[in-house]
Image: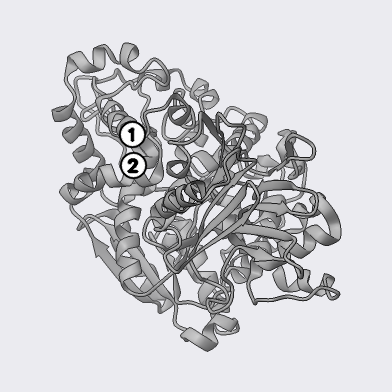
Amino acid sequence: MCGILAVLSCVDSSQAKRSRIIELSRRLRHRGPDWSGLHCFENCFLAHQRLAIVDPTSGDQPLYNEDKTIVVTVNGEIYNHKELREKLKGHQFRTGSDCEVIAHLYEEYGEEFVDMLDGMFSFVLLDTRTKTFIAARDAIGITPLYMGWGLDGSIWFASEMKALSDDCERFVSFLPGHIYSSKQGGLRRWYNPQWYTEMVPSGHYDPLVLRKAFEKAVTKRLMTDVPFGVLLSGGLDSSLVAAVACRNLADSEAANQWGSQLHTFCVGLKGSPDLGAAREVADYLGTRHHEFHFTVQEGIDALEEVIYHIETYDVTTIRASTPMFLMSRKIKSLGVKMVLSGEGSDEIFGGYLYFHKAPNKKEFHEETCRKIKALHLYDCLRANKSTSAWGVEARVPFLDKEFISTAMSIDPDWKMIRPDLGRIEKWVLRNAFDDEKEPYLPKHILYRQKEQFSDGVGYSWIDGLKDHAEKQVTDAMLMNANFIYPENTPATKEAYYYRTIFEKFFPKNAARSTVPGGPSVACSTAKAVEWDAAWSKNLDPSGRAALGVHVAAYEQKLNGKIANAPNDSPQEIQ
């Protein structure tokens, strides 16, 4: 993962402007500590901070075509770059970088080449011949990208908001699956899969097809020239990533350099649900396992730094980002620069516990579509920025473009949670890997109930955050929150506390508007809150808020109240 900053159509192209671009680019140095690059052409600047994963020796950016008339700065990985090079035999490549194909594809196919890319990416490409440029972001928004506008008519693009928030009058999160063209003067969507329309599919469920699609997604992400591992929580998703990676590692190019034993990493409070489950999976798979502990106080002490890096005040994201942020620092200290992670499965398969209340397959499917479309604001943002804060790249096989197409074509009736048929959440995925002859995982791990990351690292983590916020935010402050923060008004003291930290770093209206809002329970969208009337009284992002569903849900007292309710006041049991 790298950091990119591009400023185009500036009025000022002086040495002072160049120095300012270099200064702003340094704010992204954590994303790319290995090398810095800058290309200036008249009133355009393309800056790059590199994290070297593929071709560390010669793949420095910006990258060029043969005569350097096409310049590109890229954040991400192109997994099918070797196949694309075969299509570009008439072109001369200067490096072994997977991203160099972008410059040549543009030469060959024009602006419509983006859908040919298989990977996670955001890039800005400058065509000096026509003095035009394009910017694009991957299908789901795994890599972050922001777009801003200066008072002088300049257009800015950056991997993180902090590189443009001071100099842009307005800025927004660049939409996933979109391309901006200076020729055509606006954004258009290049990613147009069938599921995007939210029409209910009728495809047959074939467990073997689903399994093979996921194995392919994991295997292609073993493309690396640096040490790597897997983030292993012990839940279904990360355990499947680790299991498939273990089976395919020996045949990968990475094994020739780094050996065939997979490294796995887990973080949690001592005694947390995830630690024991991860250790069991690691022992079963025979990985080299690294277990990291943190305390509630260590997490609280890191909150300001976490919010600065992840650039959000969303409660769910901050709760989960903090342990991931602390773990990434430990991972980097071991010399590891890339990790595989399990994000995206719950959105695709309806794995969150609130999906138990989906009234029918149409609503179930539409909610999965809404969740996937919003991933760039939540789990993708968390996974990318928490790891990139320490110069570690996170790859997410569940969000492989081809795998999503396969999984989202299945009739959602198969995905529905049906206790009468023995189908728990994500049954179609569990069943696909339930191989009696060559088991991927122990049965009880394969069928372990969903545990949200912020819960799984230790239930006292969330309770500790709430207790800390209670001491920082008074009742009067929360009562007047709608006057202080009229947009996305925080409803709890915890949310108010995070908002104050965010506003300190990012005080502009444009910054707060990049963060989504609206009611949510156990990570649902606002629309899904309508599935259960009781949820409107118990809006909390923790999985434990799915009362009657999660085996470790908030405990109920005999007097009809909920002890330790996940908001500021106890709620009636419905």
Task: Judge from the rendering whether residue 256 lies leftward or rightward of residue 512; answer left or right.
Answer: right
How is the structure coloured here?
Answer: one colour
Of residues 516 and 47, the one nearer the viewer is 47
Give the class, few, some or many, for how many residues have Cα within 10 Å of label 2's Cα (few <14, many ≥20): many
Q: What amino acid is at disc 2? A: Ile
Residue 406 x %, y %: 71, 53
At 31% from the left edge and 48% from the top edge, which residue is drawn? 322
Label drawn at residue 369: none
User: Where is residue 58, by image quadrant?
Assistant: bottom right
Q: Residue at x 33, y 36 (%)?
A: 505
- Residue 6, horizontal then vertical, whole percent: 58, 48
Foreground residue among 480 and 64: 64
Q: Nearer the viewer, residue 298 or 448?
A: 298
- Residue at image point 24% right, 45% down: 461
Which residue was labeled with disc 1? 502
- What residue sits right under mark 2 in the picture? 307
| Residue 279 visible to an observer of this rendering | no
**For residue 86, what is the image quadrant?**
bottom right
Which element type, helix, strand or loop, lies under badge 2?
helix
Q: Is residue 100 above or below residue 386?
A: below
Residue at horizontal 69%, vertical 65%?
64
Label 1 SS:
helix
Residue 57 at x, y = what percent? 54, 79
Residue at mark 2 to residue at mark 1: CA–CA distance: 6 Å
Residue 98 pos. (x, y %): 65, 69
Query: Which amino acid type corresponds to the residue marked 1 in the rendered image?
Result: Phe
Judge left or right: residue 527 versus residue 100.
left
Residue 379 visible, this orientation: yes
